[in-house]
Image: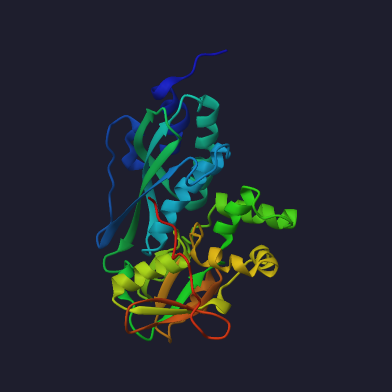
């Protein structure tokens, strides 16, 4: 059996190609990178970590783990209306992650770099006796003053979400065998949505100057809307009957209406949650990039988030969203 490449051998063989053509990467030969911006632009920085057994399942394919890691960060950039530019990455890997594992992991990153136009600039790799732990710090660019923050929602604004809601949380249940009786194709669809988010990098930048507040849905629709409302100093009201559901999620709901709370609070959707004035042409912008967008509620004076049921009354929830201990 050939000897393992080791840290620097893995960097040279699997990771350095991911930095090819990125001017600030310096060939991954230095301990730092350079990022240049055009006049009038701002650098947007975000960081996300994922841990085996918490954010992805033990045994998940390395390429899918890599792509989920990158896409979680791309979703944060999109939520501030930024265009992705580059990223740095830290890997803490147990000894069982051999050269083949790293090669497949790098292949996943390469696929998404090509799709989203982003390059690796550098990072660090260490060993750990614990679970696989991975972190990316991603950089994006936005015109100065064009960034969209969480704090701009105002009474009278409409609350929107992109895509469909609940697929990520239901997908975790599907991937772990907890959705019994679901059609196999629908089960696989939901599991794929959990493992491979769709960051809205085309829609996000178009909402610069249009959305009054925005963030992505990672910890659950209700919990994340709580954060947006608190940052803006307003209240939000959403109608549960307006939630956009995939065909697979609708099938789950048809069999078990109690899953509604999972859809509302489960997280892992990585869709955009944003507010805009009633006269904003959100439908036109979204149609231009082929991303479905749905109005699900409104912003009011006050505080907190209320979910209305089909009869227009408040829907009681036992939790608001995912929280780390």
Residue found at the far left of this picture: 39
Count the labels in the image: 0
Query: To which quarter of the image does residue 29 belong?
Result: top left
Is 112 on the left or on the right of 255, as rendered?
Answer: left
Instruction: Evaluate whether residue 21 shows in this view.
Output: no
- Quadrant containing the N terminus in the rendered view: top right
Q: Residue at x 51, y 46 (%)?
A: 67
Tell me residue 158's x, y (percent).
Answer: 43, 81
Tell me residue 108's x, y (percent).
Answer: 53, 41
Indicate whether 303 appears above or below 104. Answer: below
Instruction: Evaluate whether residue 292 shows in this view.
Output: yes
Is 163 on the left or on the right of 273, as rendered?
Answer: right
Indicate whether 106 appears above or below 278. Answer: above
Query: To which quarter of the image does residue 248 belong?
Result: bottom right
Tell me residue 279's x, y (percent).
Answer: 43, 87
Toward the viewer: 148 or 111? 148
Q: Residue at x 34, y 38 (%)?
A: 25
Tell me residue 157's x, y (percent).
Answer: 39, 82
């Amino acid at each position: 059996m050939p000897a393992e490449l080791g840290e620097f051998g893995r960097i040279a063989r699997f990771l350095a190609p991911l930095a090819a053509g990125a001017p600030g990467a310096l060939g991954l030969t230095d301990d730092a990178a350079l990022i240049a911006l055009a006049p009038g632009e701002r650098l947007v920085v975000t960081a996300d970590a994922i841990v085996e057994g918490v954010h992805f399942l033990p045994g998940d394919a390395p390429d899918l783990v890599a792509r989920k890691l990158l896409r979680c960060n791309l979703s944060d950039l999109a939520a501030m209306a930024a265009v992705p530019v580059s990223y740095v990455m830290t890997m803490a890997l147990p000894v069982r992650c051999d050269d083949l594992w790293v090669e497949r992991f790098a292949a996943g990153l390469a696929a998404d770099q090509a799709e989203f136009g982003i390059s690796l600039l550098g990072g660090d790799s260490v060993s750990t006796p614990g679970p696989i732990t991975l972190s990316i710090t991603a950089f994006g660019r936005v015109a100065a003053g064009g960034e969209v923050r969480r704090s701009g929602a105002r009474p009278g604004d409409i609350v929107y979400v992109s895509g469909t809601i609940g697929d990520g949380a239901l997908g975790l249940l599907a991937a772990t065998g907890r959705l019994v009786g679901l059609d196999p194709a629908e089960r696989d669809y939901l599991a794929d949505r959990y493992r491979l988010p769709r960051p809205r990098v085309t829609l996000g930048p178009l909402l610069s100057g249009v959305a009054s507040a925005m963030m992505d849905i990672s910890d659950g629709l209700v919990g994340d809307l709580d954060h947006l409302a608190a940052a803006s100093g307003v209240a939000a009201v959403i109608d549960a009957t307006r939630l956009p559901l995939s065909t697979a999620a609708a099938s789950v709901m048809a069999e078990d209406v109690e899953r509604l709370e999972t859809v509302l609070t489960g997280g892992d959707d990585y869709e955009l949650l944003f507010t805009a004035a009633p006269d904003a042409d959100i439908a036109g912008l979204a149609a231009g990039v082929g991303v479905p967008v749905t109005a699900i509620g409104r912003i009011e004076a006050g505080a907190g988030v209320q979910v209305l049921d089909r009869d227009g009354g408040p829907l009681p929830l036992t939790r608001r969203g995912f929280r780390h201990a």
